[in-house]
Amino acid sequence: MKKIVLGIMLLMGSLTFAQGGYEGYWMMPKGKFIIHIEKTESSEYIGHVVWLKDLYYPEGDKMEGLEQYDRNNPNKSLREENRKVIGLLVVGELFEKDGKLKDGWIYDSWNGKMYHGSAKLLDENTLKLRGSFDRWGIIGLSQKAKRVVDLKKYGILTDEKK
């Protein structure tokens, strides 16, 4: 009987894990920003910035007081003040393969660089994002993002709440 109960609990736990999946709101390390990852109709996973800890450039910055925008983009035509960091597509072309998201890209607006991207769920509330210089993911940086459940705390409105 104990084995059956344990088996049911493990099954329910794995179903919960699968239901959470990659989609959702993820707080990046140091609480600097939150991205919303969603799956498109073509099964591509993409992510947009939906919240910034510091929405405006800080005191002492040459752009002090302005809302942060994609000012370091290598493409000069994309360095416009109307291309805000809020809403910016920073994760794209990720597709699920072998239990991971692979073969995509991650854009870092703070330095204007694009990296080869991958992601893996470590548990239902922890996402490991990796940006690599090489497409194999050997040379790069990984960061752990935490799932955000209380969106009201950050003033984030979802489609259901608008």
Image: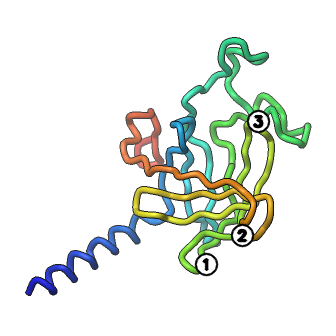
Reading the image, the residue beneath label 2 is 103
Farthest residue, direction right: 76
In x, y percent, where is residue 160? 42, 49
Dot label at residue 110: none
Q: Secondary structure at mark 1?
A: strand
Q: Is residue 119 above or below residue 86?
A: below
Q: Is residue 128 above or below residue 161?
A: below
Q: Secondary structure at mark 3?
A: loop
Quarter holding residue 44:
bottom right
Asked if marks 1 and 2 touch (Cβ < 8 Å), the reply is: yes
Judged by depth in the image, the label closer to the viewer, 2 or 3, is 2
Going by the image, does 63 lie left or right of 17? right
| Mark 1 vs mark 2, CA separation in Å | 9 Å
Going by the image, does 57 lie left or right of 22? right
The image quadrant where one finds the C terminus is: top left
Q: Which residue is at a point 60% across and 57% down the rendered structure image?
A: 129
Reading the image, the residue beneath label 3 is 70
Q: Earlier in the sequence, mark 3 or mark 1?
A: 3
Q: Secondary structure at mark 2?
A: strand
Q: Earlier in the sequence, mark 1 or mark 2?
A: 1
Q: Which residue is at a point 78% across and 39% down the rendered structure image?
A: 111
Reading the image, the residue beneath label 1 is 97
Q: Amino acid at mark 2?
A: Asp
Q: Amino acid at mark 1?
A: Lys
| Within-10-Å neighbours for mark 3: few <14, some 14–19, many 20+ | many
Q: Is residue 49 above or below residue 13?
A: above
Judged by depth in the image, the label closer to the viewer, 3 or 1, is 1
| Mark 2 vs mark 3, CA separation in Å | 24 Å
Q: Which residue is at a point 64% across and 22% down the rendered structure image?
A: 56
In x, y percent, where is residue 26? 50, 49
| Within-10-Å neighbours for mark 2: few <14, some 14–19, many 20+ | some
